[in-house]
Image: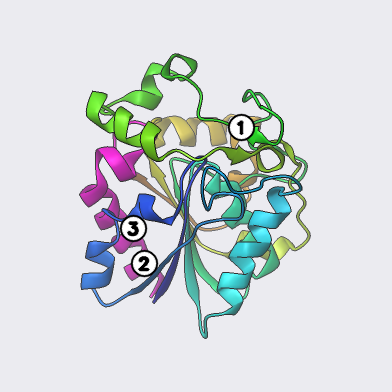
C-alpha cells in the first residue's frame, strides 16, 4: 500500500522519520510530504493557503497508481480531508493523528499569532498542558530547532468541500490528547467540533495516550497504530 504522510503545523517530511520504519518493514511504500512554504525557514509563504496544501496532497495521490492511505497529523487532518473530498475514489482509508476532518467553512486555527505571512511556533506557554504531555525538555528543544513557520493562509483559510462521497471513505482516528471515549461522547451530543467526523460512515478509534505530537513522544507506538489501520485498508 502507498501511504502519504502529511505533517501538522511547523513540520516537514522529516518529522515522520521515527514513525515510518515499521511501515517500510511491512512492505508498504511511504511518502512523507513537505508542503509548500515548509521547505525551510527562509521559504516564501506569501499566497500559500489551505487549498495550496490540499492541492499538493492531491498531486501526490495522482502521482501514484492504485489506492492510497492518507495520514494527517494535527492541522494535516484538515488537509487530508480536503484531499479525500477531491479524490474519494482513490483513498482506501484516512488516518487522523490527534486530529479530525474539517468541515465546510471551518478553519484550522485562526487564533494563532501571525507575523506577516508567517505563523511561528508559539512559546510553550501558549499550549495546553495536555498538548505537551510526554514532550520533555529535550524533545521540546529538538522540536523548536526544527520548527518552520506555517503559512498564515493555511491556518486561516476556510475549508471548501464538494463531494459527499468523502463520507464513504473509511477513517481511523488515533486519539492522543483526548481519549476516544470523549470523542464519542461529543459525537453523541452533536458537538460542533466533531460534526464532520460524525458524518463519516465508517470510523474506528484507536487510543494512544500522549500529547499532541506522538511522532516525537511515542513514535514506535504511532507507527504500529498506523500500520494496523493500513492493514485494515488493505
- SS under mark 1: strand
Q: Residue furthest bottom?
A: 65
Q: Can you tell which of label 2 and label 1 is closer to the viewer?
A: 1
Which residue is located at x 38 percent, y 17 percent? 129
Residue 75, quarter of picture: top right
- SS under mark 2: helix
Which residue is located at x 76 percent, y 48 percent? 47
Separation of disc 3 and disc 2 at Cα? Answer: 6 Å
Which residue position holds label 1? 119
- Locate the N terminus by quadrant: bottom left
For disc 1, the neighbor class at 10 Å (few under 14, some 14 to 19, many from 20) is many
Query: Can residue 79 be seen from the camera position used here?
Result: yes
Q: Which residues are magenta?
A: 207-234
Q: Position of residue 62 (x, y in %)?
A: 61, 78
Which residue is located at x 64 percent, y 39 percent? 195
Q: Position of residue 120 (x, y in %)?
A: 55, 30
Indicate whether 210 appears above or below 207: above
* Foreground residue among 140 and 189: 140
Q: Residue furthest top?
A: 125
Pointers 2 and 1 in contact (C-beta within 8 Å) = no
Separation of disc 2 and disc 1 at Cα? Answer: 32 Å
Which residue position holds label 3? 226
Pointers 1 and 3 in contact (C-beta within 8 Å) = no
For disc 2, the neighbor class at 10 Å (few under 14, some 14 to 19, many from 20) is many
Q: Which mark sits nearer the N-terminus, 2 or 1? A: 1
For disc 3, the neighbor class at 10 Å (few under 14, some 14 to 19, many from 20) is many
Pointers 3 and 2 in contact (C-beta within 8 Å) = yes
Residue 230: assigned label:
2
Q: Position of residue 40 (x, y in %)?
A: 51, 48
Q: Is residue 229 magenta?
A: yes
Query: Can residue 210 be seen from the camera position used here?
Result: no
Amino acid at each position: 500500500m502507498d501511504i502519504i504522510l502529511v505533517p501538522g503545523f511547523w513540520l516537514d517530511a522529516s518529522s515522520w522519520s521515527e514513525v515510518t520504519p515499521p511501515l517500510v518493514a511491512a512492505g508498504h511504500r511511504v511518502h512523507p510530504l513537505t508542503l509548500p512554504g515548509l521547505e525551510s525557514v527562509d521559504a516564501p509563504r506569501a499566497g500559500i493557503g489551505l487549498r495550496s496544501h490540499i492541492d499538493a496532497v492531491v498531486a501526490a495521490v495522482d502521482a501514484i497508481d492504485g489506492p492510497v492511505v492518507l495520514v494527517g497529523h494535527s492541522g494535516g487532518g484538515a488537509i487530508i480531508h480536503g484531499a479525500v473530498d477531491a479524490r474519494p475514489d482513490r483513498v482506501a482509508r484516512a488516518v487522523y493523528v490527534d486530529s479530525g476532518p474539517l468541515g465546510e467553512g471551518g478553519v484550522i486555527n485562526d487564533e494563532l499569532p501571525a507575523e506577516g505571512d508567517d505563523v511561528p511556533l508559539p512559546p510553550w506557554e501558549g499550549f495546553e498542558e495536555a498538548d505537551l504531555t510526554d514532550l520533555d525538555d529535550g524533545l521540546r528543544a529538538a522540536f523548536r530547532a526544527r520548527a518552520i513557520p506555517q503559512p498564515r493562509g493555511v491556518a486561516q483559510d476556510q475549508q471548501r468541500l464538494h463531494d459527499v462521497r468523502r463520507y464513504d471513505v473509511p477513517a481511523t482516528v488515533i486519539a492522543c490528547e483526548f481519549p476516544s471515549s470523549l470523542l464519542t461522547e461529543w459525537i453523541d451530543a452533536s458537538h460542533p467540533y466533531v460534526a464532520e467526523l460524525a458524518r463519516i460512515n465508517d470510523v474506528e478509534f484507536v487510543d494512544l495516550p500522549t500529547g499532541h505530537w506522538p511522532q516525537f513522544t511515542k513514535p514506535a507506538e504511532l507507527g504500529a497504530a498506523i500500520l494496523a489501520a493500513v492493514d485494515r485498508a488493505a
